[in-house]
Image (tube, rainbow, N blue to C red):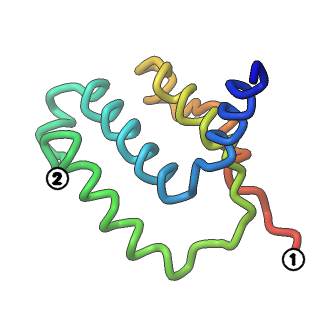
Amino acid sequence: MRWAPLLLLMGLTACYTEPEYDEDYDEVFCEHMLSCSDAAVKEVLPYGDVDECVDYRGALILDEDAEAPICAFDPSAARDCIREMRQMSCEAFEGSDYPSACDRVCAADED
């Protein structure tokens, strides 16, 4: 039974799905966008809060999904990406200095 917590943790990482990652990514992106932007930028954004931003990004992504590349989704890298993005400074966000884990979320599919 002492292995149960480790097995549970491993199972949770493997169960992280691409749609969950997409939702979490949009949420953390929007949180940074709204908390890091100055007043002048916020005035021209087509959304005023995190929920509206997530909806806006979701609509944009649905339009792009038809041309989205096929890749091998890495749930472990996805979790690391979101965890590290939540800790990003505004300076890193504004400079598009995203965590390296985010680059590994969607690896080129070998098939």
List the residue tagged with mark 1: 111
Crowding near the residue tagged with mark 1, few <14, some 14–19, many ≥20 C-alpha atoms within 10 Å: few
Which image quadrant: the N terminus? top right
- Residue 89 horizontal/vertical position (percent): 46, 17
Element type at marker 1? loop
Disc number at residue 55?
Answer: none
Please determine whether, in this image, residue 82 is positioned above or below residue 73: above
Whichever of callouts 1 and 2 sits on the residue coming sooner in the sequence is 2
Image check: 45 left or right of 63?
left
Q: Are marks 1 and 2 in contact (CB under 8 Å)?
A: no
List the residue tagged with mark 2: 46
Res 22 seen here: yes
- Residue 50 horizontal/vertical position (percent): 23, 40
Q: Residue at x 68, y 47 (%)?
A: 14
Please determine whether, in this image, residue 7 is positioned above or below residue 67: above
| Amino acid at pointer 1 | Asp
Q: Residue at x 55, y 79 (%)?
A: 67
Depth check: give the residue in front, 25 or 5: 5
| Residue lying at the far bottom of the rendered structure | 66
Depth check: give the residue in front, 17 or 65: 17
Image check: 89 left or right of 58?
right
Q: Residue at x 54, y 28 (%)?
A: 83
| Amino acid at pointer 2 | Pro
Tell which tag, 1 or 2, sits nearer the viewer. 1
Quarter-wise, where is residue 71 in the image? bottom right
Please determine whether, in this image, residue 19 is positioned above or below residue 25: below
Q: Residue at x 33, y 57 (%)?
A: 57
Crowding near the residue tagged with mark 2, few <14, some 14–19, many ≥20 C-alpha atoms within 10 Å: few
- Between the C-alphas of marks 1 and 2, the distance is 39 Å
